[in-house]
Image (cartoon, grey):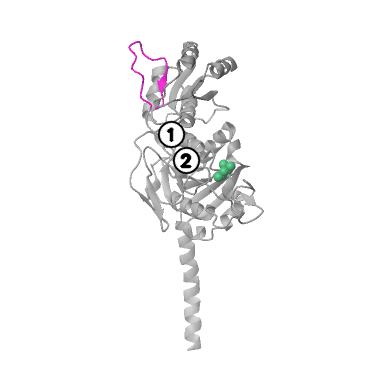
Amino acid sequence: MKLLILLSLFFLVPGLFVTRKAAAASRPRIFVLATGGTIAGRADTPSALTAYQAGTLRIESLLATVPPLRDIANVTGETICDIDSKDMTEEIWLRLARRVNELFAEESADGVVITHGTDTLEETAYFLNLTVKSDRPVVLTGAMRPATSLSADGPLNLLDAVRTAASPDAAGKGVLIVMNGEINAARDVAKTNTLALDAFQSPDMGLLGYVNDGIPTFYRQTRRYHTAQSEFDVTRLASLPPVKILYGHAADDALFVEAAVRAGVRGLVYAGLGNGSIPQSVETALTEAAARGVIVVRASRTGSGAVVPERSPAGSPFLSAGTLSPQKARILLQLALTRTANRSEIQRMFLEY
Ligand code: ASP
């Protein structure tokens, strides 16, 4: 009997090792690129939800808070930066885009997750949506509560993000944002609340899907160009063209338009009233700016709805942002200006991306 047990152990144990090894080798390879934010934030007490330091937890500790990650993917953590995303820079965007492109080009990753502060998460996501040259999944996630808080949302958001990045269904859908059990498209999503857990919404187009019980499920996808179909290439760029946003309001005047033109901007996005309306007191200055070659895009401060092109018989000197928020219109205009200064060509890009 003892001999029988010994013999079966002799044959079974190595078999188990082989099966485990094979399972590990077949798991998707997911890189988690950390940039900081509240998901890596630390507060003094578990009840502190706003008084905390963003971007203090190292990527290794962040990954260690989510043990089931190991069963889903072969996860590699890497730090890009450790910042509060209010301080995000274009230099970091360029570095991030290049790193993701590099990981896919050298076949090191099947998917990428980026942990990010929520304040500018939608902007980084849209920038990557236009500059990552691959159909493989890229998923951004963050947290509304610091890692040290009671009911921190970061660990589950990270787990859901890795699950989505590891899912074949997420391929070809553009850059995604996974938070609070919801999947949104980089183009359409916005942070719509200062503190609520469901802060990320796509007010015009709605979400793409859910991650329920750890299963990413898609219901729709965007028709706008992104990632592998994008014509923008930032491989050799050291910086982006200067473009500013001006926020429209009652009793606005030409002060900031004139200052921006003097400072040498190449583009201006006017976050206009209603359907991108521009007060007369600002319009003259913007028309002059356009005559000097500054590309002016009308967007809206309302938070939803499309800004439709002006139908003036003489042709408008301004372009329209469609359903892009002012902050995303700025990014598209910057990338457009890396390719052309032709107004109708840039308007075409606003219709396609
Ligand atoms: N200020 C933080 C950041 O954007 C907020 C957050 O991550 O939720 O980095």
Quadrant in which the C terminus is drawn: top left
Say what amino acid the circle numbered 2 marks: Thr
Q: Is residue 312 magenta?
A: yes
Q: Quadrant of ligand 1?
A: top right
Other-residue count near label 2 (Cα within 10 Å), few / some / many at <14 / 14–19 / ≥20: some
Residue at 49% over, 16% down: 294
Residue at 44% over, 22% down: 297
Q: Which stretch did the figure color magenta? A: 307-321
Q: What predominant SS class does the magenta segment belong to?
A: loop
Residue at numbered disc 2: 192
Q: Earlier in the sequence, mark 1 or mark 2?
A: 2
Task: Measure the alpha-carbon separation of dots 1 and 2.
Answer: 9 Å
Say what amino acid the circle numbered 1 marks: Gly
Q: Are circles 1 and 2 on residues that touch, CB within 8 Å?
A: yes
Front-most of residues 31 and 130: 130
Coordinates of residue 351 in the picture (x, y in percent): 36, 27
Coordinates of residue 130 in the picture (x, y in percent): 45, 33
Local secondary structure at mark 1: loop
Front-most of residues 70 and 298: 298
Coordinates of residue 253 in the picture (x, y in percent): 52, 17
Note whether residue 57 is visible. Answer: no
Coordinates of residue 342 in the picture (x, y in percent): 43, 17
Q: Is residue 343 above or below residue 159?
A: above
Q: Which mark is residue 83?
A: none
Residue at 59% over, 32% down: 91
Residue at numbered disc 1: 303
